[in-house]
Image (cartoon, helix red, strand yellow):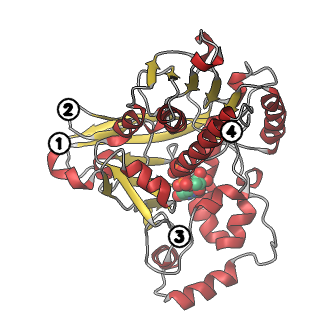
Amino acid sequence: MSADRRIVCVGAGFSGAVIAREFAEAGHRVLVIDERDHVAGNCHTERDAETGIMVHRYGPHIFHTDNREVWDYVNSHATFMPYVNRVKAVSGGRVYSLPINLHTINQLFGTAMNPAEARAFIAERSRQDIAEPQTFEEQALKFVGDEIYKAFFHGYTRKQWGVEPSDLPASILKRLPLRFTYDDNYFNHAFQGIPAEGYTALVASILDHEGIETRLGSRFEDLDEAPLHLFYSGPIDRYFGHRLGRLGYRTLDFKEIRSADDEGIGNAVLNYCDADVPWTRITDHKYFAPWSLDETRGSLQFREYSRACEAGDIPYYPIRLVSDKDLLGRYVALAEAERRVTFVGRLGTYRYLDMDVTIAEAMKAGRAARAALETGDLPRPFYESAA
Ligand code: UDP
């Protein structure tokens, strides 16, 4: 009978781990599979043996949230250390403060404006005639005007997404704040930090329950048991064997630079906004653990290059062009017809989710699915927040 069948989670990232834990604590048996040889998905971290630096293997991850429940949850599985992301940007051979704040504006225009002056100055330059910006470019022009757009957003965005900003949704730029003070915290959230022992230890702690079996190096396509219910956090188009075509994703290549110089680039993140520099940013990973700078040797930097994701590459960012959204709609229709599967996470729902939103959605999806199964209903096939 179905009672002895297991819940199966495909993907051992935050989505799969949080859902697995929810079911395990309710007395279910859960199998979590992942084709890679580690848990935590693209949040995976590992300590480099030579330098002692905790490396964010698939690019930098800074935990930031306003959601108290999510913050308490991750803090119950790891010791979080205070960390404030302060990003610098290179544009036209000069270094600027990011996100766009009073310092950036004064640096770019060679001024010494106060907040009120800068606000009026930007209002004059921003495109007030754009009522409802639809694209990234319209959003940027309305938000900051042409000079700032060209200096910081056009080249970087072109490199990061591989298309013109006029083809991208405005939502991508809405991730970034604009401030008329000298506050250069990259994020606006109440809680921010990085786990002292990295994200992989955090996810391993979530999975550490007697009801959960985690099987690494195991592909979804080779799954040989019929689940009570399946939670799928891989790419939604891959689940359906790409039968309607491939959704667009960006993948990243990292060029590692080891340096004996302890100071490295001098900061955790340096963005390169000009189109003629092929990488988007350099990250210097020792600075993601400012509490342990004395315990590491040298510096370990990664130049980050973005390109189209081909078959066999690791997908990082869903692009969500209009054509992708049409195709997604057709995959969602197929997903809705699946009876015992729920699609979750950044890849399962094809959305640009941060870690905290991924966890909040996994908590909700797990709880809702558990309640549904207990009453004999079928859980929702495609999890998407109402927002
Ligand atoms: N962005 C940009 N210039 C920058 C930083 C960001 O144009 O110096 C744009 C770019 O399109 C990027 C988006 O803003 O994809 C969101 O930036 P975020 O730093 O949130 O990107 P992530 O760290 O998730 O890659």
- Examine the rendering and report whether any part of residue 156 can be seen: no
| Disc nearest the viewer among 2 and 4 | 4
Q: Residue tagged by mark 3?
A: 100
Instruction: Give the residue type that dot 4 points to.
Output: Thr
Instruction: Give the residue type that dot 3 points to.
Output: Ile
Residue 212 image position (x, y, % from top left) = 45, 25
Residue 203 image position (x, y, % from top left) = 41, 37
Q: Residue tagged by mark 1?
A: 297
- Examine the rendering and report whether any part of residue 221 can be seen: yes
| Earlier-in-chain disc, 1 versus 4 | 1
Residue drawn where x is 26% and y is 55% of the image: 290
**How far apart are labels 3 and 4 at the CA level?**
30 Å
Q: Residue tagged by mark 4?
A: 349
Q: Residue tagged by mark 2?
A: 50
Identify the image quadrant of residue 274.
bottom right
| Earlier-in-chain disc, 3 versus 4 | 3
Looking at the picture, tell me which residue is in the foreground, 216 or 314: 216
| Earlier-in-chain disc, 2 versus 4 | 2
Tell me if label 3 and label 4 are in contact, CB under 8 Å.
no
Residue drawn where x is 63% and y is 46% of the image: 352
334 left or right of 343 in image: right
Tell me if label 2 and label 3 are in contact, CB under 8 Å.
no
Looking at the picture, tell me which residue is in the foreground, 231 or 282: 231
87 left or right of 336 in image: left
Instruction: Give the residue type that dot 2 points to.
Output: Glu
Q: Is 349 drawn above or below residue 101 in the view shown?
A: above
| Disc nearest the viewer among 1 and 4 | 4
**How far apart are labels 1 and 3 at the CA level?**
33 Å
Instruction: Give the residue type that dot 1 points to.
Output: Arg
| Earlier-in-chain disc, 2 versus 3 | 2
